């Protein structure tokens, strides 16, 4: 079965130009430019935590370690997003990372649910090492 080549003006066609050692045509450059702009905008939103562009720069504060559940959720979303654009050679590795994160998320969410039902107050940083061990993450 032969592959269908994507038409000019697509990201795939831009990559084909590069792979073949050709100068990308204007429609392909424009498609790639739009993709790159989209990536930069998404990264900017992630980096500033969806802050508005006109917000004043905040003064640096002490680093606060994020809670493991939030961190695992964010990492899971990043891996899933990476799988959408990853080359076939990277899919297996990303799939394993996704599966490991999924297990960790389940454990962390179960632990959080147990704490919530037991009435125990959750203190940020409280028993962090225990939570990470339960999630299967070695420190």
Image (tube, rainbow, N blue to C red):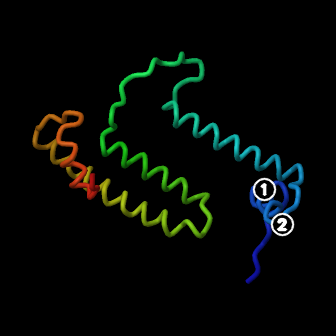
The structure residue drawn at horizontal position 55% and vertical position 34%, both measured from the top left corner, is: 45
Judged by depth in the image, the label closer to the viewer, 2 or 1, is 2
Q: Residues within 10 Å of mark 1 (few under 14, many from 20)?
A: some
Report if the CB atoms under discs 2 and 1 are less than 8 Å apart.
Answer: no
Q: Position of residue 52 (x, y in %)?
A: 55, 23
Quarter assignment of residue 134: bottom left
Classify 89 as above or below 106.
below
Residue with the mark numbered 1: 10
Disc 1 element: loop
The structure residue drawn at horizontal position 89% and vertical position 53%, both measured from the top left corner, is: 25
Residue with the mark numbered 2: 20
The structure residue drawn at horizontal position 55% and vertical position 55%, both measured from the top left corner, is: 82
Classify 20 as above or below 111.
below
Q: Nearer the viewer, residue 116 or 19?
A: 19
Quarter assignment of residue 65: top left
Q: Residues within 10 Å of mark 2 (few under 14, many from 20)?
A: few
Q: Nearer the viewer, residue 126 or 45?
A: 126
Q: Position of residue 71 (x, y in %)?
A: 37, 44
Q: Quadrant of the N terminus?
A: bottom right
Classify 6 as above or below 32.
below
Disc 2 element: helix
């Amino acid at each position: 079965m032969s592959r269908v080549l994507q038409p000019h003006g697509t990201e795939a066609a831009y990559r084909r130009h590069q792979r073949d050692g050709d100068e990308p045509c204007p429609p392909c450059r424009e498609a790639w430019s739009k993709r790159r702009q989209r990536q930069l905008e998404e990264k900017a939103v992630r980096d500033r935590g969806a802050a508005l562009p006109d917000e004043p720069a905040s003064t640096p504060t002490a680093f606060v370690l994020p809670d493991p559940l939030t961190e695992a959720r964010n990492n899971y979303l990043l891996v899933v997003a990476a799988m959408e654009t990853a080359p076939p050679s990277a899919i297996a590795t990303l799939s394993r990372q996704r599966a490991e994160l999924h297990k960790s998320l389940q454990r962390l969410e179960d632990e959080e649910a147990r704490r919530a039902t037991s009435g125990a107050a959750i203190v940020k940083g409280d028993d962090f090492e225990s939570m990470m061990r339960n999630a299967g993450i070695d420190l």
